[in-house]
Amino acid sequence: GAVVSQHPSRVICKSGTSVKIECRSLDFQATTMFWYRQFPKQSLMLMATSNEGSKATYEQGVEKDKFLINHASLTLSTLTVTSAHPEDSSFYICSAIWFFDRVPDTQYFGPGTRLTVL
Amino acid sequence: AQSVTQLGSHVSVSEGALVLLRCNYSSSVPPYLFWYVQYPNQGLQLLLKYTSAATLVKGINGFEAEFKKSETSFHLTKPSAHMSDAAEYFCAVSDWNFGNEKLTFGTGTRLTIIP
């Protein structure tokens, strides 16, 4: 299957700093990527849909100024957690849609990024 | 609106026994259905998917699932459990329309394998 990578895999930062997480589709172009947040022992919560060349679409209750998303190329989307606080500590996972013959086929997931805010 | 219900947040089976993880869906349009597996501190790996072709879908690692429209179910099975199957399993649904490729996930089922 297609491969999606994330960097970094783990990050620890101080409260008030900003953290950038990268999501890359390694062997396919992804016009649409998604960002999820997962709390311990819980399911994935969709945060936003990242569309190449346009503004991200945020889910209800997600602060767009807090979680900045940039999808500047067909293989890279970034999530920046601005002014991070301990409650932002979580596991962040991205995914990318692989299209087959121009039809959305499968959503492939990255390995996740563990963010810890001290 | 679509939704997925996974019955049983925890399932334990003995090594070599049948694995059955339940998933029921609700969708107003013909759905696309997926099963993903998540190992600790990792992302999700696609096990299999149903996209309106054959109702019995075979996936990786010996897993398969059957789409039953009359029961609105998409249960995941494996004839013989291995220790390596211990993980969290998520069922997901999408109507996969352009501009709306979102997945709606179930709450997950943690599978434990008893030696």
Image (cartoon, coloured by chain):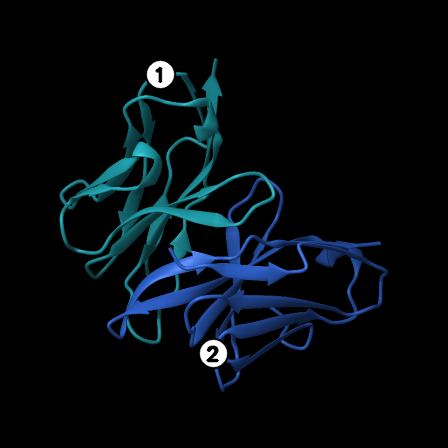
User: Residue B16, labelled with which disc?
Assistant: 1
Please give left or right for residue A90 compared with residue A24 in the image: right
| Screen quadrant of the N terminus of chain B | bottom left
- Chain letter for the cyan colouring in the rendering: B
Number of numbered discs: 2
Residue visible at 48% across and 13% down in the picture: B115
Taking B33 as reference, is B66 above or below it? above
Chain A: colour as depicted = blue
Residue type marked 1: Gly
Taking A101 as reference, is A88 above or below it? above
Quadrant in the picture for residue B20: top left
Please give left or right for residue B38 compared with residue B35 in the image: right
Residue type marked 2: Leu
Image coordinates of residue B29 in percent, x first then y, are: 21, 61
The answer for which chain carries disc 1 is B
The answer for which chain carries disc 2 is A
Residue visible at 29% across and 42% down in the picture: B59
Q: Are tags 1 and 2 found on a single chain? A: no
Mark 1: which secondary structure?
Answer: loop
Residue farthest along the bottom direction in this orientation:
A53
Image coordinates of residue B3 in percent, x first then y, are: 35, 52
User: Residue A74, labelled with which disc?
Assistant: 2
Q: Residues within 10 Å of mark 2 (few under 14, many from 20)?
A: some
Q: Is residue A61 visible to the viewer in this orientation of the structure?
A: no
User: Residue B95, labelled with which disc?
Assistant: none
Image coordinates of residue B49 in percent, x first then y, are: 28, 50
Mark 2: which secondary structure?
Answer: loop
